[in-house]
Image (cartoon, helix red, strand yellow):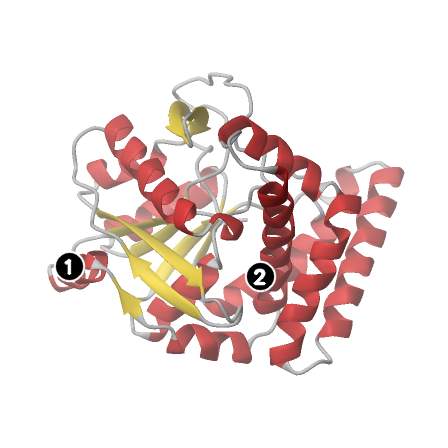
Amino acid sequence: MPQAPSALSLKQRISYFTGNLALRGVIGLVGLLPYGWRVPALGKLTSLLGPIAGMDKRVRANLALTCPELTEAEVAHLCREVSNNAGRVIAELYAGKPFLERATAAPISGPGFEALQKARDENRPVILVTGHFGNYDAARSGLIARGFSMGSLYRRMANPYFNEHYVRTIEGIGKPMFEQGKRGMMEMVRHLKQKGIIAIVADLHVHGGELVEFFGKPAVTSTVPAELALKYNAALIPIYGIRRENGLDFDILLNPEIEHSDALTMTKAICDDLEGVVRKNMGQWFWIHRRWKPYVPAPKSDTTSGPVEP
């Protein structure tokens, strides 16, 4: 659980403070560039720093586990693509209006969009599930701009100094935001009870989750989105912000609504849907995450864990 600065050791505070200054400095410098240069510039810089920052090591480990058939050239190319996309996401997140304009202009397609409109017409709650893929905030921004007000669950950053401005930034895209934890879960459930729409990033390792295959390997996955959908009769719809080839624009895709059955079956459907989209755009998924960590069961009464937005 991330801690407040006062709870950290002096060494940790110094490390987090200097790290935040460095990151804010880089964001500020690239922010001086026009948007069309800024996004690729931070993408390129992040790609160059990938081997030094340890991102390549994580990407390679995940690909070796799940996609051993890839050649060295393909793996090396994906290392650069993944870190480049991560840098672009950071630049876009802090760009404000220019990014929102791109997201608003992004075309929306897929049968899930019709399901979303139907749920709104029927005053039925909706849970939009996505992954750390492309730019998930592009999809959120695009729907909000079209009148689909929604709340999002997020996880507090480990670096408290960075977390302060990070939360302000994601709140600028849309509110309400629900911080992971008991209070945030209560607020999110209240939002669902009021027939609202929530967005959840559902591809992180979550303590207390269930083992679900993702890219052919068991990954600990939260069943919370499916459980909430069943409990509150919410439409469960996968959504993605897919980056276009030009690196700046997006397509918003809403795949078919996941049929209600049981929480585990529905969670498997979420993972299968995401995998299908990732396989078509391998370099856009955040292979830098520790997605396939060991399984450690948690008490069933633990309601604070769940998939969250980074």
- The answer to which quarter of the image holds residue 148 is bottom left
Horizontal side, residue 229 vs residue 137: left or right = left
Query: Can you tell which mark lies on residue 123?
Result: 1
Point out residue 33 in the picture as x, y percentages from the top left corner.
71, 80
Label 1: few (<14), some (14–19) or many (≥20) C-alpha neighbours in 10 Å: few
Residue type, numbered disc 1:
Asn
* Amino acid type of the residue that numbered disc 2 sits on in the rendered structure: Val
Can you identify the residue that label 2 sits on?
89
Q: CA distance from mark 2 to mark 1?
A: 33 Å
Whole-percent x, y for residue 188 in the image: 37, 48
Q: Quadrant of the N terminus?
A: top right
Q: Residue at x 29, y 56 (%)?
A: 197
- Position of 298 with respect to 84 (left or right) is left
Q: x%, y% of residue 100?
A: 48, 75
Mark 2 or mark 1: which comes first in sequence?
Answer: 2
In this figure, what is the number of numbered marks? 2
> For the residue carrying disc 2, how many other residues have a C-alpha within 10 Å: few (<14), some (14-19), or many (20+)?
many
Q: Is residue 128 left or right of residue 295?
A: left
Please report the residue visible at 32 percent of the width from the left and 37 percent of the height from the top.
272
